[in-house]
Image (spheres, rainbow, N blue to C red):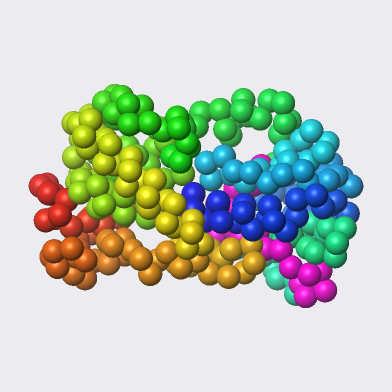
Amino acid sequence: MPELPEVETVVQGLREQVTGRVISSVTQRRANLRIAFPPRFDESIEKTRITNISRRAKYILVHLDSAQVVLIHLGMSGTLRIMPKASHQVHIHDHIWWDMDDGKRLVYHDPRRFGLMTLADEDSLAEHPLLAHLGPEPLSDDFSVSYLKAALSKRHIALKVAIMDQKLVVGIGNIYASEALFRARLSPFMPADAVTLKQSKALRTSIQQVLKEAILSGGSTLRDYVQSSGDAGYFQHSFAVYDREDEPCITCHTPVQRAVQAQRASYFCVNCQNVNR
């Protein structure tokens, strides 16, 4: 599932390619993805101009000059690719595409159909049901050390599970949670409410560093994810622990271990992260 760096990479690519373009036509091949498209969705966005592309958590936000915003979530296997209209060879899982006034086409492809595409009003975007419950952005000033320490102190659950809670902080999925905890030298199993102020500072720094580095690398491609250009990401080549079970730790050479937490795989070094289970 694309995490924050992958979504941000897609946003940056689309912003460069389609900002200022008019959506000349929309081809919608089904009535729903994870949820139904809004009634007359295609007609609602046709002939509108894209004024900006932004991101909130793992949602791609396409701002239109109609004062509406298209909310897009890529789900487990969704991709958004921009290409010349003439080069698009339609695939069975290409569910919707937008043709631009410059001859380019934006194609949403999603084999599992766990993604979504819906509309919101610009002036009430923050109150939209998909966004209203979300925590701060991890790369924003709102995600301060004091905020993180206070938020963790209210959660008597495992630390890795806590930092993947989108109400606490958005966009941190399984990959980057494992990587950030390794960098901060914190056990994924320690109680979140036991994290000290010093550890909160180390964790915030590690989260921000790993996300920034992943964005610069174009995200991580493990299965379906590609950038809007169709290129793969490269951060998977920099993983310290994720998906490296039984391989030597890059720091101490102890074999990396794997365990399941909240139905997700956690990867860690028992030595560097002082893991006691």
Label tally = 0
Q: Which residue is depicted at the point 81% across and 69% down?
A: 85
Magenta span includes 3 = no
Q: Which residue is depicted at the point 26% across and 41% down?
A: 202
Q: Position of residue 266 (x, y in %)?
A: 28, 54
Q: Which residue is depicted at the point 71% across and 63% down?
A: 82
Residue 44 visible (yes or no)? yes
Q: Which residue is depicted at the point 82% across and 38% down?
A: 65
Instruction: Please name whichever residue, 236 or 245, is drawn nearer the observer in this view of the structure.
Output: 236
Left-right relation of 179 to 6: left
**Over which residues does the magenta segment extend?**
71-88
Magenta span includes 79 = yes
Left-right relation of 161 to 94: left
Residue 110 visible (yes or no)? no
Q: Position of residue 114 (x, y in %)?
A: 57, 52
* Image height of 277 relative to 246, above or below: above
* Image height of 137 relative to 90, above or below: above
For residue 43, which quarter of the picture? Answer: top right
* Image height of 45 relative to 272, above or below: above
Instruction: Please name whichever residue, 196 or 170, is drawn nearer the observer in this view of the structure.
Output: 196
Q: Position of residue 239 (x, y in %)?
A: 33, 63
Left-right relation of 22 to 11: right
Q: Position of residue 11 (x, y in %)?
A: 62, 52
